[in-house]
Amino acid sequence: MKTFTLSKLMASAAICAVALTGAAYADPHPDAELIIEGELKLNVRAEAPAHLDGALPELYSGWLFRTDETRELQMDDFENPAMIAVEDGADLWETADGAAGQSCADCHGDASESMKGVRASMPKVNENGDLWSMEDYVNNCRTTRMEAEPYGWNSGDMRNMTSFISMQSRGMPVNVAIDGEAAPFWEKGKEMYYTRFGQLELSCANCHEDSWGMMIRADHLSQGQTNGFPTYRLKNAGMVSIHNRFRGCIRDTRAESFAIGSQEFRELELYVASRGNGLAVEGVAVRQ
Ligand code: HEC
Ligand code: HEC
């Protein structure tokens, strides 16, 4: 396994070198299978969607790029540290809040039925033609229906709630719509994905499309898929949302980032999710 430092990646000539040698070292775990509790198999490999036009030979979950120990944590719900967030989210689901005196469960009932598949299709265009992430749907119910305060996008309550809702889609294939009303948002997200940011002049694609499989510092670069979110990061010892992850990656290029919950990040979220169409929603993942 070759190691490239950021400063080497930085020189644009080196990017080409990385891209070329990348293929030779670009191996995610060759045969690991993600089977939860020995029962539920999640597809961590999938055929690349047509819109990628050959840019990725096959889709790989970020799970395949992690160490044996990290992968194992996710195979056992009792060991998986993200399950605490899921349990806290389940409690919130049942708890009345706001002037209307209602809980999520009062309207949506059993989440294993009403929220099944919701995560797999997020973000999506709402009835007013706006692109909404799961966090927007949650807060819309809280403010307009429950007459409660919105959760902060990055608050503990929001991360617990999105973890709980995501779990209801565990194992289902990511399937975000990119046509029709979603198309203009998707185009913008795509443009952003290929835009070079910061002093290092690196785009998402430079790392996650051209160089996946390479080592960057101590990190084994993945395809930057979002099917595992919300994700428990061992490094942060807590749950990380998709937008928070984007912000971290952009900051690593030494650029100013867009805000969590910004329109730019919703569009980027849609585009990145579409690059994973076909991979299993992991519910809540564990990464380093
Ligand atoms: C007063 C009833 C009511 C309450 C309380 C309520 N919701 Fe909703 N919610 C709705 C309705 C109606 C919709 C739109 C129709 C639908 O998709 O079910 C909706 C939609 C949603 C969606 C989008 C589903 C989709 O498939 O697009 C999510 C996610 C959601 N609610 C989560 C929550 C959460 C989390 C809570 C508690 C914090 C909550 N809701 C509380 C009525 C409610
Ligand atoms: C300098 C290289 C670099 C750039 C540029 C970069 N990332 Fe990352 N990204 C990483 C590293 C390193 C990780 C952690 C290891 C891994 O999962 O690839 C990561 C992780 C991720 C993950 C989590 C994957 C998982 O399975 O948990 C996502 C999603 C992601 N990046 C998206 C993006 C997006 C979107 C952009 C562009 C805004 C971007 N990244 C730009 C290096 C980069």
Image: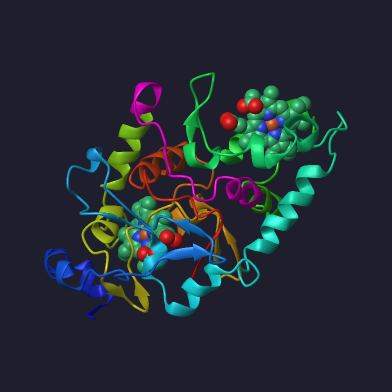
Residue 127 visible, this orientation: yes
Query: Residue 200 lies in what quarter of the image?
Result: bottom left
Q: Is residue 15 above or below residue 93?
A: below
Picture coordinates of residue 74, whole percent (x, y): 53, 67
Work out whether residue 35 or residue 18 is closer to the camera in this orientation and state it.
35
Q: Give the residues in magenta.
A: 162-184
Q: Is residue 28 above or below residue 108?
A: below
Q: Is residue 212 above or below residue 3?
A: above
Picture coordinates of residue 217, whole percent (x, y): 34, 78
Side of 143 where 200 appears, left or right: left
Residue at image location 36% in from the left, 47% down from the top: 276
In the picture, the quarter occupied by the N terminus is: bottom left
Q: Magenta stretch containing residue 168, yes or no?
A: yes
Work out which residue is located at the far front of the displayed protein and give it: 39
Residue at image location 53% in from the left, 68% down from the top: 75
Q: How many marks?
A: 0
Residue 254 visible, this orientation: no
Picture coordinates of residue 34, whole percent (x, y): 45, 64
Side of 222 where 232 appears, left or right: right
Residue at image location 72% in from the left, 32% down from the top: 108
